[in-house]
Image (cartoon, rainbow, N blue to C red):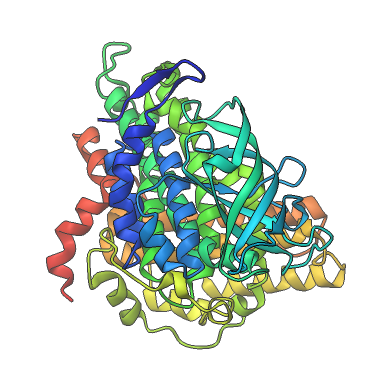
Amino acid sequence: MTHFVNDPQFGEIIDFEHLMEELQGSYDQLFPDFNMVGAVQVGSKAYDDQPSYMVAGGASILGYSMLLAAEEYELAQELKGKLFTLGWTEEHTGTDLLSLTTAATPMADDPTGRKYHIKGRKWIINNSYHAEYHTILAKIDPTQDGPRSMSLFIVPRSSCKNWERLDTHVLRNMVLTTYEVDGPGILVGKAGHGLQIVNRMAMPAKYICSYLGVRLATQAVRATIEHLSTKRIFGDHPINFSNVYRQMYNLVLQTSYLEFTYYRAVAFSDSSFLQFHGTMLKSWLLLRCNELMCQNLLVAGSKGFLRESVIGRNAIDSFVLPVFDGHYTLNTLLTAKMMKGYLNGTGRANLEERLHTLRRQNIFVPGTGNQMNAKSGDIRNPDFFDYADYLEQINAPVDVDGRLIISRVKDLLAEMDAKELTSSAEYKYKIGVIQHWLESILSAAELWKLVGDDYLNAIVQQYNGFVKVFNDIIAEGGLETPFLHVIHQQPIPETDDPVGYLRRLLNIEQRWQELMPAMGD
């Protein structure tokens, strides 16, 4: 059972002994066979979905994964089960890793060429006071700032000192600190390959981080259903009021859709779509989870303010996942680079093959894969296909015209190019956001195709979300591309048991399990 301890130095914090006891199960999922989602699922179950534990455990998993990304397999076996940190960020640089100043000086008496003295200061690092090992990014030549300027080192706790606790508004039971590194460390991988190792680890890591957001959203919405079905106001349970039922229907449908979108991305991750879906999950999906949990808090009312309630806690704690040092912005900018390939794909996607990929096993129980060893040249150029043709193959009974969508987006990009807007960071970000919303429509259409009419309005929700973003870009920039129009939802199902219906709608995994025999292979 997950619990907190009263530490004389830090107050109420996670029990790091319990954290470390359960980490072995997650590491077993990573090495020798790599199961990126299995690792975080094991941790999520062991830590009772408690955000402070899951994020602290996730940080150690990612730190350990750096050894795998560097192909340091003997070291990974030796240190399996230890507690790690990600010693990347510095206060003046944040996510701008190329500007870090931590220095690594070779030890003259080391015949292996792998021992260095590491000196610098790291900032807002999770687990840092309690961790046994730190994966530190540092520069062998501090005057350099190019892609080959960084190297990765494994540094023991004995080389660190002067920890200072940093109080935060979120995940208050973790221990985030700033601290000094001043002591020996071991080079991991090749000198100058630090950024390459980070990128190799980061692609599958996006799926691990995104899992936490989806779990927090599902947990919070489920708690609100239970609260509104037991609370009494004006002589009845609020869930029975038509306006409350409609709000919860929309939230539940979105939550189920986001969960499906996550596992859909996992199903296609061991392919050229690893980076494309990963950047969407780490930005678009996590921001949607944040928005959803804030709306859910409003519907739940004062219950969400209580300390023991997951409704408010999850709404607050979830913000660390996409927001930390602007990760959602960086990932959206990465997606924007793929827009022309996405819009101009000409290959015909095989609908049955894609559905078979999702059907062939329970997508909620992911298996091992080779995502850690994906070649950057492959995942930077995904196998995009004809968007409009694929929507036509799905043939959902809603007024979503794929050819009109693609035509209008191309018109918008052409106008941006003509006005020399696409070179600015603002509009690159907007392009990435559009692309994420386009893909969200496809995901919702596949959800309906696989699971049925109860989820048809998910397509409408995603299409209308896309239209709002598209029209906002036109309005904010004073552009002349014609606006798109939203479409109407299908009628919400009438039911004598709104609580039972919402519970079933939210439990997309159970629905999937029930349909598996009918789906066949």
Residue 229 % position (x, y)? 26, 24
Of all residues shown, which one is farthest toward the top?
234
Q: Nearer the viewer, residue 425 or 461?
A: 425
Q: Is residue 104 above or below residue 266?
A: above
Q: Is residue 353 above or below residue 372?
A: below
Residue 345 visible in rendering: yes
Residue 318 % position (x, y)? 49, 38
Q: Is residue 217 left or right of residue 96?
A: left
Of all residues shown, which one is farthest toward the left?
517
Q: Is residue 192 left or right of residue 399?
A: right
- Tell me the residue at 65%/69% (across/down): 191
Of all residues shown, which one is farthest toward the bottom?
347
Q: In this view, does 378 lie above or below 441?
A: below
Of all residues shown, which one is farthest toward the right?
419
Residue 396 % position (x, y)? 38, 68
Q: Nearer the viewer, residue 122 or 255?
A: 122
Which image quarter is the N terminus in?
Answer: top left
- Tell me the residue at 76%/52% (across/down): 475
Which image quarter is the C terminus in?
Answer: bottom left
- Tell me the residue at 44%/32% (across/down): 314
Residue 7 % position (x, y)? 44, 19
